[in-house]
Amino acid sequence: MAGPIHPRLLKRAKATRVFLVASVVVGVATAALLIVQARLLADWITMAFETRTFPPGWQVALIALLAVFAGRGVLAWLSSLLAHRSAASVKSDLRRDVLRARLATPVGGASSASLVRTVTQGLDSLDGYFSKYLPQLGLAATVPFLVGGAILIADWQSAIIIAFTLPLIPVFMALIGWTTEKATRHSFAVADRLANHFADLIAGLPTLQAFARARAQRKGVELSEERYREATMKTLYVSFLSSFALELLATLSVAIVAVTVGFRLVYGDVTFGTALFVLILAPEAFLPVRQVGVHFHDSADGVAAADAAFEIIDAAPEAGGTLPAPDGPLRLESVGYRYPGSEAAAVERLSLEVTPGEVVALSGASGGGKSTALAMAMGFLTPESGGVTVGGQPLAETDLASWRRRVAWVAQEPGLINGTVGDNVALGHPGAGADLVARALRDAGADFGPDKPVGDDGEGLSVGERRRVALARALLRIREGGARFLILDEPTAGLDADTEAEVIRAVRATGAGALIVSHRPAVLEAADRIVEVAA
């Protein structure tokens, strides 16, 4: 367990630090009002028993007591307001950082289903961390000490009992917290697997339907749901059991104080007013600490999601250097890369060079690391060994934004936006005219016009049509946007031989250096050089 306060949230999110200070201030004010409330109740109830009627000035005492209640209500409202604003600020910061990290590393890393679940439902669970757990932590850090000090002044014997029994609650809370954290992390992981399973099932549903295997997947979804239900019930079981343990411990501690005070009152060792004052305050000394353990479970899901978000953020490559990208060849010099959690290297000792105007093809078996090599060339991944240079300048010292402005990249699964084909092609050079967009589409082998509608994530286009749109966008970026390198991952897959030949001619005609991953014989024959990538 990381501790009562999540260190990464405290370090990264300024709103967390501000809220913690505010929680301590609210805790001090709450403790002061509790002491005033106990003093008013003890004094005036004692006077009522002594006089056997309403004591003089009871109206003033009632007004003062109502003012104390109102003050505690205002403090609770203020704490809730600060909590929700802080939670919203922290969630917004984390979501921006996660998306920034994802944009910096669009290959590898967390799946889209995990990413969506983390930044939506996962981080929304931080509301419990800020609205319940942290405010109670602020109260636990202030109220017991101030209330205990007031009891010490009134009755030192009761204060000693509280001082010995109160620390037992944090000890049990820590022991329970380890179990809770483990159960929560397991539940989050199971939910993550369920989300990925469902996303993969939806993505492959057309293929499954074509081979009459869609209904057979129902059993797998049911098994995943059952595992998630079991993990959730285990977390709830730990939560309720730990709450019962903390409540029992706090109740017994208060009972010890009450019994000792009662016997001392019978034998005249303490006055009725003091005994009543101690009995009113004693539960308040234990309540904030006990509630910290109870509300820890409210925050556990949010903390698990925050840890998942930090893993995504930490996986992003360094921001790179500040030097502008120079002219000259692109070189990969004996580069190697191993994905986290993988035993085998994805790429090992790969070297190649692409000069302006040259077409270099990467060939090899599937899974041999060709796409990983392209990702290192783009700066999405940082090589573990070797290095990438542009014009003799290390890519690690180069401003990645200036380098990527010189590159047109076409991925295996190109991203498309909602709109038209023309809108997507024009992303290669915003402001390009309709004639330039139409020409790029023709050169990319498209047999459809720029007015064809496109849905989210390329809905309405086949896989081959999406690649044509992405290739047209890359050609426009080279011709009009000033890019000098083409980096293409299987750009002609799904094209017929004639269209493929047209695409190759269009790529060569740009005069840009091209690094192409392909298994197609026509592409390999048209390349100036072929670099084999060993699996």
Image: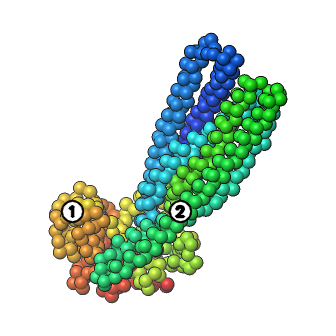
**Which quarter of the rendered picture does the N terminus lie within?**
bottom right
Q: Write down the residue under mark 2.
A: 233
- SS at mark 2? helix
Q: Amino acid at mark 2?
A: Met
> In the shown orientation, is residue 362 left or right of residue 452?
right
Crowd class of label 1 (few under 14; some 14 to 19; many from 20; radius 10 Å): some
Q: Determine the residue located farthest toward the front in the rendered image.
A: 52
Q: Work out whether mark 1 precedes mark 2 in sequence or the reverse, and give the earlier one.
A: 2
Q: Amino acid at mark 1?
A: Thr
Location of residue 463 with respect to 17 vertically, above or below: below
Crowd class of label 2 (few under 14; some 14 to 19; many from 20; radius 10 Å): some
Q: Position of residue 192 (x, y in %)?
A: 48, 66
Q: Write down the residue under mark 1.
A: 420
Q: Determine the residue located farthest toward the top in the rendered image.
A: 56
Q: Position of residue 78 (x, y in %)?
A: 51, 33
> In the shown orientation, is residue 150 left or right of residue 496?
right
Residue at horizontal 27 percent and vertical 71 percent from the top: 466
Instruction: Tell me how far mark 1 sits from mark 2, CA to CA.
Output: 47 Å
Q: Position of residue 476 (x, y in %)?
A: 26, 65
